[in-house]
Image (cartoon, rainbow, N blue to C red):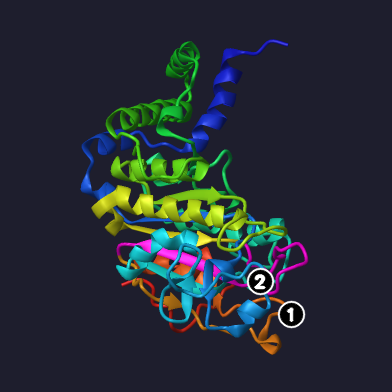
Amino acid sequence: MTFSRRIFIKNAGLGLLALGLPPAFVLRAAQGEEKNRGKILVVVFQRGGMDGLNAVIPFREKGYYSLRPSIAIAEPASGDERAVDLDGFYALHPALAPLKGLFDQGRLAIIHAAGSPDNTRSHFDAQDYMEIGTPGVKNTPDGWLNRCLARGHQDLTPFRAVALTSRLPRILAGSTPALTMTAAEEFRLRNESFAAALQRLYATAQDPFLQQGSRSLFDGMEVMKQVAASVPSATGGYPAGRFGGSLREISRLIKANVGLEIAFAEIEGWDTHANQGGASGIMANRLKELAEGLSAFYRDLGDRMEDVVLITLSEFGRTVRENGNRGTDHGHANVMFVLGGRVKGGIVYGRWPGLEPEVLYEGRDLDLTTDFRAVCGEILSRHMGQKNLSKVFPGYKFPSRPPGLIA
């Protein structure tokens, strides 16, 4: 079977045009125009279901210690194995100590007993519901971050939405283009000869749509080449591994003024059914990585953090009672962190439901008192200027008073 030049151009174009790159963005990025320094939302997904009760500890609750005899974190006091007091009722896990300064400075807010109201204990379903923004409704075709982007702008940078992941996450899937990448240096065609040949083929294409797509693709590659050359990657502070690297690259894109509006990163390893540990162990290691990453990101951005809000999500929490393997099973409500320049931090938000047996969700879990959509909706509205939240979170009735996280 012969493979004609025309078929090659058109089929290649389908993939390249998925980037949706307009030709004017290169000049704007190079000039670093102020309009490219807009508000930015960064979403960090903690895949696996974090144990919120051991991340932000209600140390005044007697039930916390009686239900967790081997994994509970000791009350605040001197020593590396002790919880870090926040307000006399809540305390941070010692591995989250790097976040204490941000909390005290009013830049970090915490929402307890928060999450998705759906009662599934399936990782796949719970993550899907949280990413599409319609808990309990499976047939929603796109992610809520993608719906947030669909605001009718013209002539926009292709770097509006970037996921630092190997594949496009469900939360960004939809009609508005979004990119996936690992680093500025990787946003290129590795075979230079092939790239040159592809560029020549597109240059002779008769279809103006394909011509524009090819110009946009190679312009985008040129911008990322400039970013790689002119905006050095931060050398210290970030934890080793994929999560730290993702936050480092997001910071780089923000400082490069490429028009980033939404960025997504993820950190795995929160499914702690066995040997979860207390002040040290499996979960403590994940919390340390999270805290070091968030604090390094804040320091790296400096005054640019005034334009940024970062929010964490995890599909569900863990059971209040530890299991027979010194771990915790899939639960319900959890903890969210919100970090940024306009965040009204230094507060643990959300109504605390208690840990008494009669108030536990289904007799085993922390009950949910704050829907994650209320938190995300306020950030989209007050920080990102989203005017129609009903399109972002269809079917959700927002509370009459928002949580009050954003100044």
Quadrant of the rendered image containing residue 157 = top left
Give the residue type that dot 2 points to.
His
Distance of label 2 from label 1 (alpha carbons): 9 Å
389 or 84, which lies in front? 84
Give the residue type that dot 1 points to.
Glu
Quadrant of the rendered image containing residue 235 = top left
State if disc 1 and disc 2 touch (CB < 8 Å). Answer: yes
Q: Position of residue 297 (x, y in %)?
A: 37, 50
The answer to whether residue 150 is seen in the rendering is: no
- 335 within the magenta span: yes
Q: Residue furthest right?
A: 324
What type of secondary structure mainly makes up the magenta span?
Answer: loop
Please name the residue that numbered disc 1 is placed on: 362
Q: Quadrant of the N terminus?
A: top right
**Secondary structure under the numbered disc 1 in the rendered image:** loop
For residue 38, side relative to residue 142 (left or right): left
Q: Residue furthest front?
A: 79
Residue numbers of the magenta segment: 315-341
35 or 341, which lies in front? 341
**Secondary structure under the numbered disc 2 in the rendered image:** loop
Q: Residues within 10 Å of mark 1 (few under 14, many from 20)?
A: few
> Which residue is at a point 48% across and 22% down the rendered structure image?
189
| 172 in relation to 350, above or below | above
Q: Residue furthest bottom?
A: 358
The answer to whether residue 341 is seen in the rendering is: yes
Q: Residues within 10 Å of mark 2 (few under 14, many from 20)?
A: many
Please name the residue that numbered disc 2 is placed on: 332
